[in-house]
Amino acid sequence: MKKHLNKFIDFLKAEQGVSPNTLRAYTRDLEEFISFTDKKPGDIDNLDIRSFLAFLHHKKLRKSSISRKLAAVRSFFRYLYMEGYVKKNPAKLVSSPKIPRSLPHFLSVDEIFCLLDTPAGDSFRETRDKAILELLYSSGLRVSELTSLDISDLDIKESLIRVKGKGRKERIIPVGSKAMAAIQNYLPERISLKKKSSALFLNNRGGRLTERSVRRILLQCSRMVNLKGDLSPHTLRHTFATHLLHGGADLRSIQELLGHSSLSTTQKYTHVDIVHLAEVYDKAHPMAKVKKK
């Protein structure tokens, strides 16, 4: 079974262009499944997979986590069937758990401005952190896309960046004037490290900044301005998309900027917009303020 898993991971890496993060998640989830079943691929049926889901439910995992693990199992058996390692695909008979739709968490305009103003000094660290926050909000990048940026991906003259998204798909994204100014302010400090690296964002030792470091930077800045909740780089991505929608941008444009392969993924922001419109109505419309007798 382990041999088949290794071949599957190699297939995802070479043929599908799957990101390192997704490869690690698939490996981790499938190793858990293999350990649970302890059977050869051809001996596994849909009941074994359902038992695995029941096991995960008993561990009190969230439905979203269970659904993700099931997706990994489905992809694995789809590959095994396609390559002829199994005669049937038992995962096709297993349905995903229903996941309650939750609205993306985003910051208000006042909150995001307050956050962006937090790194205010001229040191390497402060100019770098300022550029990171400004770029995340300006362009709606995933944290993996931000950390994989190279100097060569930056077009200062045209205010554009080339982003490597999921499945190695590239897209060109505009960068706002404030974000570009922050990047240009950071670049001399980056050069002062005198480290040979292609990465745009570096750590203090001159290596490429990690996703974990970006999350830590964002958390530290959010605590300095007392923002509620666990802020993550994805919160800024949600904020970017939601503010664009509030400003009148159409879904197709937002889809392109975010790098979503399907418009249905982008449509979750319309629900946020409806909630926002209802709040505006309640605050602004005279009849909304009339108290019922």
Image (cartoon, rainbow, N blue to C red):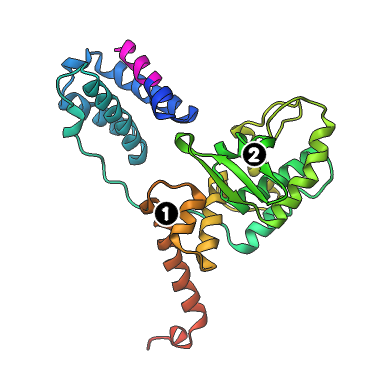
* Mark pair 2, 1: CA separation: 25 Å
Q: Does residue 262 appear in the picture of this structure?
A: yes
Q: Quadrant of residue 132?
A: top right
Magenta stretch contains residue 5: yes
Please rate how many residues cluster around mark 2, counting C-alpha atoms within 10 Å: few if below 14, some from 14 to 19, many from 20. Answer: some
- Compared to residue 140, the image places residue 147 above or below, namely above
Q: Nearer the viewer, mark 2 or mark 1?
A: 2
Please rate how many residues cluster around mark 1, counting C-alpha atoms within 10 Å: few if below 14, some from 14 to 19, many from 20. Answer: some
Q: Nearer the viewer, residue 83 or 266?
A: 83
- Residue drawn where x is 48% and y is 38% of the image: 169
Q: Quadrant of the C terminus?
A: bottom left
Please name the amino acid that badge 1 sits on: Thr
Q: Quadrant of residue 287?
A: bottom left
Q: Nearer the viewer, residue 149 or 39?
A: 149
Query: Which label's residue is closer to the chain start, 2 or 1?
Result: 2
Question: Label 1: which residue?
Answer: 266
Question: Label 2: which residue?
Answer: 153
Image-based side of 90 in relation to 152, left or right: left
Q: Nearer the viewer, residue 171 or 272?
A: 171
Q: Nearer the viewer, residue 124 or 173?
A: 173
Q: SS class of the residue under badge 1?
A: helix
Please name the amino acid that badge 2 sits on: Asp
- What's the magenta region? 1-10
